[in-house]
């Protein structure tokens, strides 16, 4: 999975050196980031003119906090590829005015020309970014309250104690994600199988935020055998009589 997606990114960079990438965090993309670092070291990927926008950040954390997504990205990608610092964009979780920070981030994405290639993970509850299940979804970058299962999934960044994970975050919205020109979603593990099945075959609903990807015309799912256990090839509907 990591090799396949990394090669796709390297090809996209060769085709458009000023590529704008949307980036996720979590466990799933770690092997991908290692592979991108390897390709960069081998001279097979060049990020020198590319730009990146991360999906989300915990509210109330300074960039230097070891649990922040800025720290995560520095550890796992940014210090291993030749991205220019002024082309790296992350939400400021410690901003004095979170609403203004969200508006600034939306504007920065527009000024960069929009996201060319958006990489996504998916939560076991069907969230993408920090767009959590609920009665509605936010289209634009916004402040959001994290579900307990999402905080538990991020405990690894806080010494394994999910109670130390912030209760709120800033996240790119579903509408902003859907404006990306291409989307690649990666998922691994049996605990993702049910939400993948609902994402692909279920109704488009804010109760499964990832289901909104059905509305996009250029989405690729990259799954391991366990995450994709419930996904089958397209089937023809019988015509109604």
Image (cartoon, rainbow, N blue to C red):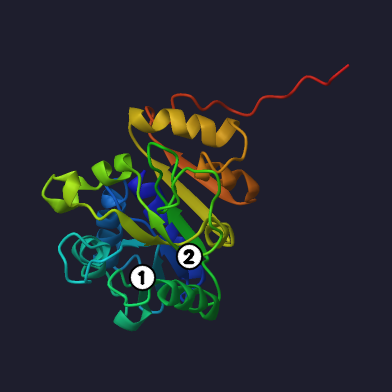
Which residue occupies the extreme right position in the image? 241
Which residue occupies the extreme bottom position in the image? 86
Q: In this figure, which residue is indicated by the disc labeled 2? A: 141
Q: Dot 1, how many residues are within 10 Å of its Cα: few (below 14), some (14-19), or many (20+)?
A: many
Residue 42 in view, yes or no: no
Q: Nearer the viewer, residue 53 or 77?
A: 53
Say which element carries label 2.
loop
Distance of mark 2 from mark 1, alpha carbons?
Answer: 10 Å
The C terminus sits in image quarter: top right
Q: Report x, y in % for residue 131.
A: 45, 51
The answer to which of marks 2 and 1 sits earlier in the sequence is 1
Q: Is residue 71 above or below residue 203?
A: below
Q: Nearer the viewer, residue 126 or 4?
A: 126
Q: Dot 2, how many residues are within 10 Å of its Cα: few (below 14), some (14-19), or many (20+)?
A: many
Q: Report x, y in % for residue 28.
A: 31, 45
Rendered image quadrant of residue 205 = top right
The answer to the question of whether label 2 and label 1 lie on touching residues, with beta carbons closer than 8 A, is: yes
Which residue is at 37% across, 74% downward?
89
* Residue 91, disc: 1
Rendered image quadrant of residue 53 = bottom left
Q: Is residue 69 left or right of residue 19?
A: left
Residue 235 in view, yes or no: yes
Which residue is at 35% across, 66% downward?
45
Q: Is residue 111 left or right of residue 23?
A: right
Q: Is residue 10 left or right of residue 160?
A: right
Q: How many marks?
A: 2
Q: Report x, y in % for residue 128.
A: 44, 49
């Amino acid at each position: 999975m990591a090799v396949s997606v990394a090669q796709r990114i390297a090809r996209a960079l060769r085709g458009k050196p000023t590529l704008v990438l949307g980036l996720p965090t979590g466990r799933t993309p770690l092997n991908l980031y290692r592979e991108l670092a390897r390709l960069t070291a081998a001279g097979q990927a060049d990020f020198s003119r590319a730009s990146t926008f991360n999906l989300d950040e915990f509210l109330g954390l300074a960039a230097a906090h070891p649990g922040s997504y800025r720290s995560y990205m520095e550890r796992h990608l940014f210090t291993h590829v030749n991205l220019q610092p002024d082309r790296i964009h992350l939400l400021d979780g410690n901003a004095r005015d979170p609403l203004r920070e969200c508006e600034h981030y939306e504007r920065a994405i527009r000024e960069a020309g929009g996201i060319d290639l958006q990489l996504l993970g998916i939560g076991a509850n069907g969230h993408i970014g920090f767009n959590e299940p609920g009665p509605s979804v936010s289209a634009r970058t916004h402040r959001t309250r994290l579900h307990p299962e999402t905080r538990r999934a991020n405990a690894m960044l806080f010494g394994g104690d999910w109670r130390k994970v912030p209760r709120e975050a800033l996240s790119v919205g579903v509408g902003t994600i859907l404006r990306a020109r291409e989307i690649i979603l990666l998922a691994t593990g049996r605990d993702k199988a049910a939400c993948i099945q609902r994402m692909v075959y279920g109704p488009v609903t804010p109760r499964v935020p990832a289901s909104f990807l059905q509305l996009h015309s250029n989405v690729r799912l990259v799954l391991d055998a366990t995450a994709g256990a419930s996904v089958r090839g397209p089937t023809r509907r019988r015509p109604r009589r």
